[in-house]
Image (cartoon, grey):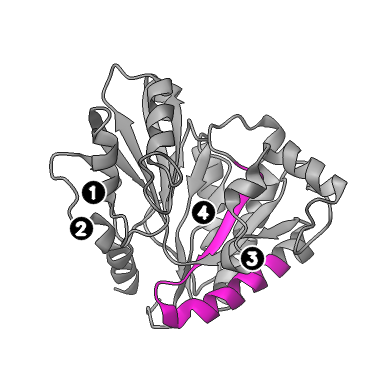
Amino acid sequence: MRMTDTILTAVPNVSEGADASVVDAIGAAFASPPAVRLLGKPHADRDHDRAVFTLAGPPGEVARALLAGAREAVARIDLRRHDGLHPHVGALDVAPVVFLDAERRGAACAEALLAADLLGDELGLPVFLYGLLGGGRTRAELRRGGPAGLARRVVAGDLVPDFGPHSLHPSAGAVLVAARPPLVAFNVELAGPASVDEARRIAALIREGGAEGLPGVRAIGLELAHRGAVAQISMNVEDHLRVPLGEVVAAVARHARVAEAELVGLAPAAAFEGFPADVPCRNRATIEDALAAASS
């Protein structure tokens, strides 16, 4: 595939991170349209029970790739048996189409709406728009109470899906769709001994709206049982130019010793400007490098 200025990316997240065979099958489905490529390896996490994929392709094909991957996710994931830590409402939980610059914003919006229509019409998934397509509605608002909470609000008429049926799929829930600029999913792990309560306290301090709030940073504190009860602060950094990842690490380090960091998916190279050299970062990879590799 030759990368051009018309290439869009998408970052679908599915609610499965423990079964590698399921993750691989869903990834193969996402990459099944000939014009679409997976960028890098999917990021799968057993504690979060979640996998994150990054796709790239031309307009029209990205939406069809999202449909293909969603079909596989619906067939293989049953939320009634899901016990991961990450907030979620669907087997294909979120399917954002990402514009890397302002010139591609319109194309990304059109692609996200096409994907939403296909997911609702062909798979019978209720689709909720968030972000700029959803009038500023957030993922956190829609995920409040998990699949059961979302189902109750739909039945009560408090929420109406933007596409698809007006009830949640019995095993696959709903899907959240957006068009957005790059968002960086980023985790910081505290050096032991550190408790999940300490991670939650720091998350509350540094997230937007907290006493030391970083703008556009969403943060929760978690305990990773499969990593030996590691205390983790799991974050989304919505504006990496305003708040680079080095600043996020420094904010955490003011309250606790940092063991290492982790990138989930890909990040723009600019997100790592000023990143501390003494803090290891697992899975560090940039969108620019991945796009260059896909074009070679």
Residue 36 placed where, x, y %? 49, 70
- Residue type pointed to by label 2: Glu
Between tags 1 and 4, which lies in front?
A: 1
> Residues under labels 1 and 3: Cα distance?
31 Å
Residue 10 picture location, percent across and down:
50, 64
Cα gap from disc 3 to disc 2, whole angstroms = 32 Å
Q: Badges 1 and 2: C-beta atoms under 8 Å apart?
A: yes
**Is residue 254 shown to the viewer in this render?**
yes
Can you tell which mark lies on residue 246? 1
Which residue position holds label 3?
A: 135
Residue 244 position within the rendered picture, expressed as x and y whole percent measured from the top left: 28, 55
Give the magenta-colored segment's residue range: 88-117
Above or below 182: residue 219: above
Identify the residue position indicated by label 4 in the image.
27
For the C terminus, the quadrant is: bottom left
For badge 4, the amino acid type reads: Gly
Q: Earlier in the sequence, mark 3 or mark 4?
A: 4
Alpha-carbon span between mark 2 and mark 4: 30 Å
Please, what is the three-letter code of the amino acid marked with disc 3?
Gly
Judge by depth and name the residue closer to the eye, 195 or 81.
195
